Structure formats: structure tokens, C-alpha cells
Amino acid sequence: MSPEPELRLHEEILLLTLKDEKGTPAWTQYTYALAGAILAELVMEERVRLEERNRRKPLVDLVSATQIGDPILDDALRKVRLARRRATAGTWIQRWARNRLLHETARRLVLRGILRAREKRVLLLFSRTVYPELNPGPEQRLIERMREAIFGNDDVDARTATVISLAGAADLLKPVFGKDLKGRKDRLAALAEGEAVSEVTRAT
């Protein structure tokens, strides 16, 4: 069994999504990227697979119902197991892409001391919870890993290729790497061609 990664894919996507100081999402459709990351994790953990016969709308097949130990991933896996019929990758992403997904993922990072939870007043009438960054180390290591993969030419592990592809689909790469990405289109396309990466990204 491979060791648990420092951060799960949905946690990495959330760190890229949140504004470091304000703790609010910088992108309105972030929930779909988070949900796509959950699907990618389940594929990598060999709990589900994407049916290869239909590349445009791959169906999600249950491989193993064994829990992973992450409550968000285990809840998603339980829903796949209990579903009356198979659904496409895009359908599962839509089902999982709910507003609470941000808070559920952020709370895990708060418990680990990476983010902090803060109540913010809105128009003096309402309050909402925001998640400013408390420990920038994990995100900095993630960005450096992504930088080496994007601007280098060496082989890249599936986890790094997937987070880069999901971040690209969610328009999260430009704010981090800026204009330097223009010359790396072929490299980004190559990273997105890995096993299961392109299907999950397309569904997202």
C-alpha cells in the first residue's frame, strides 16, 4: 500500500482556489474542480474505474468499497456503492459539487494547522466562514512541485499530472504562473494525456 500523500487532490485544489489572506475562493466554479479531484482520488486509490468503452461520457464502476480513511472520499465512495445504477463521471462530479464541499475540505486543513477558520460579517446582517492561510508551507511545496513538472521535461508522477490538469481546467494555473505558461502548451497537453487524467479533467 502506498503511503498517504501530504495532501489529497481536493485539498491541493482548494489551496490553489482560496485567496491566501482573505480565505475566499478566487474562482466561482471551484466546486466542480474539487469534485473532479475527488473522482481522481478514487481512481488512483483503485476504488473506482472509468469505463473505457465510452470516452466521451465514461461510466464510473465500483472496484472496491474498502474505506480509504478520508471522510470526504469515503462519503463519495459510499454514494457510488449505494447508487441504484451506474452514472457517468460528469454526473458524479455534479452530485458532489455542492457548496458544503469547500467547508468540509477546509475544516480538514484547519485541523492540520494549514488554514484557520474566521467568521466574516457581510452587510452587517449575515456572516460566513472564510479560511485564510495559516501555514503557507504545503501550498508552496505544491506550487514548486507543479513548477518543476510544467517547466521541466522529466517524467511526472500521476498525482502531480492530475492536479496540474485539474487546475488548468479550472483556470487556476494563470494566477500562479502567469505569462510563462504560454510557451508550455505542449507540455501541459502531454501531462493531461496520462491514464485516467484526461477523462476526469474532461468531465470536470
Image (spheres, helix red, strand yellow):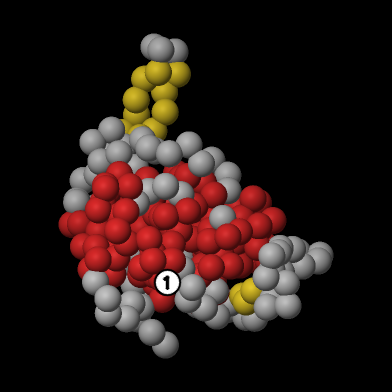
Residue 187: quarter of image? bottom left
Pointer 1 residue: 190
Q: Position of residue 148 (x, y in %)?
A: 23, 68
Q: Residues within 10 Å of mark 1 (few under 14, many from 20)?
A: few
Q: Position of residue 23 (x, y in %)?
A: 31, 37
Residue at 41% from the left image edge and 55% from the top image edge? 167
161 left or right, relative to 96: left
Is residue 159 visible to the viewer in this orientation of the structure? yes
Furthest residue toward bottom: 1
Residue 191: quarter of image? bottom left
Secondary structure found at label 1: helix
Furthest residue toward top: 124
- Choose between 32 and 4: the one closer to the eye: 32
Q: Quadrant of the N terminus?
A: bottom left
Reply above or below: 29 against 36. above
Reply above or below: 152 against 27. below
Amino acid type for the residue under numbered disc 1: Ala
Reply above or below: 98 against 6. above
Is residue 65 visible to the viewer in this orientation of the structure? no
Residue at 21% from the left image edge and 46% from the top image edge? 134
Reply above or below: 153 against 162. below
124 left or right, relative to 177: right
Q: Position of residue 121 (x, y in %)?
A: 36, 20
Q: Quadrant of the C terminus?
A: bottom right
